[in-house]
Amino acid sequence: MSIQISNLYFSYPSSSTTLFEDFSLQLYEGWTCVAGSNGCGKSTLLKLIAGLIKADSGKLSCCDSSVYCPQETAEIPENLYTAFWADDNEIRRFFSRLCVTEDMLERYETLSGGEKKRIQIACALAEQPLVLLLDEPTNHLDAATASLISSALSDFEGIGIMVSHDRAFTDSLCKRTVYLYNESRAFAGGRDCIVCDTYPCGLSKALELRQCGQEQLRNDWEKADNKVAVEKQRSAALEAENQKARARLSKKVVNPGDHDTCAKIDAARVSGKDRNTGEAKARLESQIGRTETKRDSIKKSLRRKEGFSVEKTDFAKPIVIDGTCIIAGDYSLDFPDIEIKRGTKIALTGQNGAGKTLFVRHIIELLKNNGRSNELLYLPQEISDEQRVRILGEFCRLEEAERGEVLSTLFRLGSEPERLNHLQNDKVYNISDIQLSPGELRKLMIAIAVQRPLSLLIMDEPTNHMDITSVMALENALAALDCAMLVVSHDKAFLDKITNVMLVAERNDLKGKITKI
């Protein structure tokens, strides 16, 4: 069984450009990861396969037995109650395997994101589809929940397709990766539409192969271009010799009465002695044409600058957190003395509900009480509409040079910041019309914050809502940053790249503790 997509065309009615143009792809049984930048059509591709939207033209062969699980889990799955109470134990076993209990059904609205995701996937598996499509299944999940879901999905025997930036999760399931990208932004002279490359491996290996492939294409193109330049220099030198030869064989400046000189010129013309450079140039011109053809047959991979720096981190003072026990309702959190110095990059991990957010709030309050709030950037897990307006307003009030630095940083973090280019100080009223994705807002907050001195950068699940291109650009930038950081994340690959100290929040009934490793 396979899904065959041939010569597919699709564009949204509100868009002036075609998203997919003559797009072809084949998908097979087993799990495939779909990756790429924001806006490259990952979710659209899944919805096309699921039949939720229709292509403008082309062929898409897919069976009717497909289930699509969106990122959002606010809506209760339609088959939740019928599947959970089904007589068929084969159906009910999915709920048991994902630890979905009866009481969870009655309080769905109050469940955590991880609990809702477990229910959503259990309901999808209970449908026993031939095609299962998952859109960012691990957002907001702790490591234990992600492992539980991965185990349940590993037994799925149909065609599984997931959009995800979680390298550890996808690597545990996916044997193939489809990478979507806008061709015009990846290669010189590329089309302004989405194309794909496929790799017979998981996401991590696919990203390595992709990077190596791009570097190889760049090297091959530059090598061929350098060869063209050398050959053209040789051609120019031969042309200069030809000019001299033609001047030597010309009688225009010779006195007609100078018979000896005229005779020598006639003899040179007959012997063809000065014809060699002209023939060599002709051969070289032919070679240049072949070299240019070879160069132009190589896709010129475009290089994108990455990274940024924080201003004046050398001023930063250590942050000392005295060990204590925090009481929050029926819950308490114990932690030891902790000192955060410049260059200390802490990974704060642990299961959901273990007190990580409580610890973060304690640090923020501590800095505030000590008059050091201006040294801190806190990047929350979710950004409210009020915060969105404040962030965009702060961007608008920047001086032109500062705004240019912010836009440059955004680009280096994997964004295409055209929508912010037109915002000027006299157009603040347009802020409410600017709709940026949560991932783009996070990057904008970082880009603005690094324009001022920082002692501590606190990030709560910074990779949620971000595409893999942005995640990798962010982790490369943060790895090179020398200010102190505290990162709450379940993305192991991300934490391994950027942190050097680990704090683990452990939950024991209604009591939590943070241990330093």
Image (tube, rainbow, N blue to C red):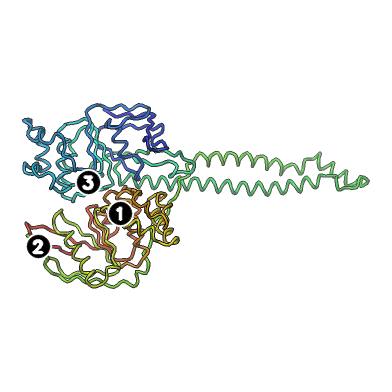
Please report whichever mark, 2 or 3, sits nearer to the chain's N-terminal start.
3
Q: Quadrant of residue 448?
A: bottom left
Residue in the image at 41% along x and 33% along y: 21
2 vs 3, front mark: 2
Please report whichever mark, 2 or 1, sits nearer to the chain's N-terminal start.
2
Give the side of residue 234 with respect to residue 78, left or right: right
Q: Quadrant of residue 174?
A: top left
Residue 258 position within the rendered picture, expressed as x and y whole percent measured from the top left: 92, 47
Instruction: Work out which quarter of the rendered image holds the C terminus and state it.
Output: bottom left
The amino acid marked with disc number 3 is Thr
Look at the picture and state if 36 lies above or below 333.
above
The amino acid marked with disc number 1 is Arg
* Disc 1 to disc 3, C-alpha distance: 24 Å
Residue 433 position within the rendered picture, expressed as x and y whole percent measured from the top left: 35, 48
* Disc 2 to disc 1, C-alpha distance: 32 Å
Residue to which mark 3 is pinned: 138
Residue 190 position within the rendered picture, expressed as x and y whole percent measured from the top left: 46, 40
Secondary structure beneath dot 1 equals: helix
Residue to which mark 1 is pinned: 388
Residue to which mark 2 is pinned: 332
Labelled pair 2, 1 in contact (Cβ < 8 Å): no
